[in-house]
Amino acid sequence: MRRTAWIGIALSILVGLPAIGLVAAAASIDPNRAKPRIAALVEAQTGRALSLNGPIRMEWSLRPTLSIADARLANLPGGSRPDMARVERIEARLSIPALLHHRIEISRLTLIGPNILLEQVAGRPNWVFQPQDRPRPGTPGPATGDKGGFALAILAAHVQNGMVTFHFPARTSVIGLRSLDYAHRRWTDKLTLGGVLVYADFQPFTLHVSATPTGGTFDPWTTILQATAFDASLAATGSMSLDGPFALSVAMRAPALERLNQLLPEMRLPALHRMELSARIRNGPERGDLPIAGQSTLRFDSADLGDRVPGLSLSGVALALPKEGGVATASGAGRYLTQGFGFNATLAVPVLLDGRSLEPLALDLHTDGKDQDTLSLRGTLALADAGYAGFDGAMTLKAKNLAAFRPIASPALPALTNLSLRAGLSLPAASDRVVLRGLALSAREGDLSGDASVRLGGAKSVSGALRSTRLDLDALLPAPDPSPRPAAGGVFPNRPLPWDMLRGPALDLSWRADIVRYRGQDWPDLRVAARLDQGRLALSLPGGLLQGDLTVDAGQRRDVPVRLAVRTTTLALAPVAGLAGVPGRVDGTLSLSLQLAGKGDTPHALAASLDGSLSLSTLGASIGDQALTALAGPALKQLGAPPPAGGRATIRCLGVDGTLQDGVVRLRSIALDAGALILSGSGMIDLGKETVALKLHPLARLAGSRVAVPVVVTGGFSSLHAGLDASGLDKVGLLIDALFGGDHPKTCAAAGLAPAPG
């Protein structure tokens, strides 16, 4: 607004000053001989050189008119271009009676095709002139002329088809002047300026300015400014000075603020609808300072902010600042995707927005509905030149069910209920990092505490050290399918593994839980540490009940290598049996040692490449008949033995030992002693082909005696079948006590799982 007002005030001075010497030219037989004198007079008045490149013509009448073509006024030294103003043609209508009083009075000045540049050169505005005979601006009254004592007065001016360029460090803007009219009868009278302007060839807008001097030219002018564009209106009243100082009361209405982006595209004005603004603003103490805001209010009915934050809209928003340096308040409602909310906020606004400051901020959000969830922020907001420079404070969140926010946040949000969260919160501007300090989360399903940091910009990362006293995964995870089926395409399908997820944010997390409940069992002292950088994952269980390591190098784009090592001596059998699909209840603990290494981009390729070893065993476990039948069903069927009955069976020992090479598991020993069923054997499992070939020696009680017969189990994972092995025998028969020593079997002892029977 201030720069637009300068157009009219500066225009008559910048371009009209060549008329100082028009009378001298008129007195000559050839007016063109007066060019040097005209240029000298203008330079004396402005301190700038004037170039008159076209011819000068005089039309004599009672009101003689002088015309000059192609005139140029020099810019300050070091400006972005040599000339500050260019004019295709100047026409000046002169007053003959005024010459008798040593006045060059131009009753009407017409400028055709002016091109004006407004800029600051070395901190000095080029629209402020320094006459050679007046060292300092501010002297009241009109400018004086040459030694003859002539004074210049321009009573009215008309500009047609011109342009003004505002060239400043932040941006360059161009305003076209379709028409502009100026009137100023005397130096002590009101100056008026009005016209139709065009910004960047879009729809024209109107501008009207009136200014009344309070003293000299460079003293404050009482100013009224009005502008309309795209159904928006702006009015400003107050005082302005040619060299910068101003104090204005501003009022603005805009049915659709975003339409003004056609005039000011670099401002990226938001889509505020039915907006009303009133504000008092004045200049800062130093040239170039941001304006100082006084009593101000802003209201709008609705706002679509989807171009800033997808899915965000606001409604019924009111902002108010009571005075300079006061506390601003804001309130309203909104919607983010599917969730409605309301908000209230307060923020201290510094008097001077330039530089850095720390201001207290309070923000409260609540969701719509009967059971409102709430989010509160309290802390200090850092500002730098009126821009965001960071936040440091505390956050409080209360939610009935966190899963309700999955549609607007992330599907990965856990289903925590009766959630309460408190944490110190830092949001530094430079690092794009969210820092949580002293995190304390409690919910019905568990708790979490510690410190964490999330980097959102640039190289995204998550780091932290967290602790839980209890966590119920059974309540958070979906219930398992009671009858799991092989995935489409086999147990190990050919669909791509999610290695791309490992090529994203970096991780450095540690977590320790006193008790984790999973599959109905409590897992005490569970510890996890995860590091991920540039696709290389290192996951470790450094201590407690379960120990192990997993490494994945997804930095390689093909054939991603994977290594897994697991060690435990007291792992609960129930969750392991559940993951393996064993039906019924299984109690007891398991000793497990697993070393695997492979590479691949699909589950099938990875399984078919595995090398390593495995060993598992359990002593004194308890298993249901349903589970026992599922484990030994093929062998019992071939023996013609009925499934064991009696509810539950005690597993005296269970052990498997083997090696892996190129996806083939070679089981060197299989041993099971479950009282009613004793079994030993060996075999192979081809993970790539998903086939099984086992040779088992079951021993069951038939007709009061223990009998054994070799059984071969073969086939695919989903289509196993068993048959009696008669190789080396003349006929199929029952071999009593051939392998197991009668009623004193040595199965577990032979496998090293139990001492030999006495």
Image (cartoon, rainbow, N blue to C red):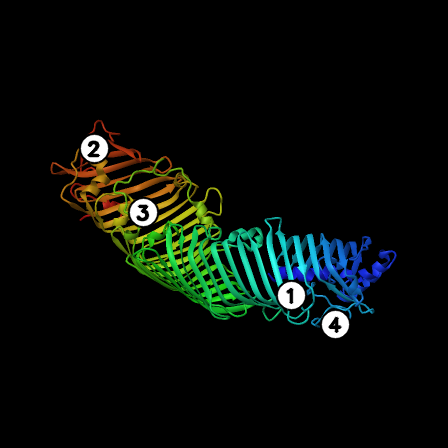
- Distance in Å between CA atoms under marks 1 and 4: 26 Å
**What kind of residue is marked 3?**
Ser
**What kind of residue is marked 1?**
Lys
Label 2 SS:
helix
Label 3 SS:
strand
Q: Which residue is mark 4?
A: 135
Label 1 SS:
loop
Label 4 SS:
loop
In terms of sequence position, does the residue under pointer 1 or pointer 4 come before the other? 4
**Residue 584 located left or right of residue 218:** left
Expressed as whole percent of the image width and height from the top left, the position of residue 513 reads: 32, 59
Expressed as whole percent of the image width and height from the top left, the position of residue 9 reads: 67, 62
94 lies above or below 477: below
Q: Which residue is mark 1?
A: 190
Q: Determine which of the numbered discs, if any, sits on residue 615 in the image.
A: 3
Q: Determine which of the numbered discs, if any, sits on residue 638 in the image.
A: 2
- Distance in Å between CA atoms under marks 2 and 3: 28 Å
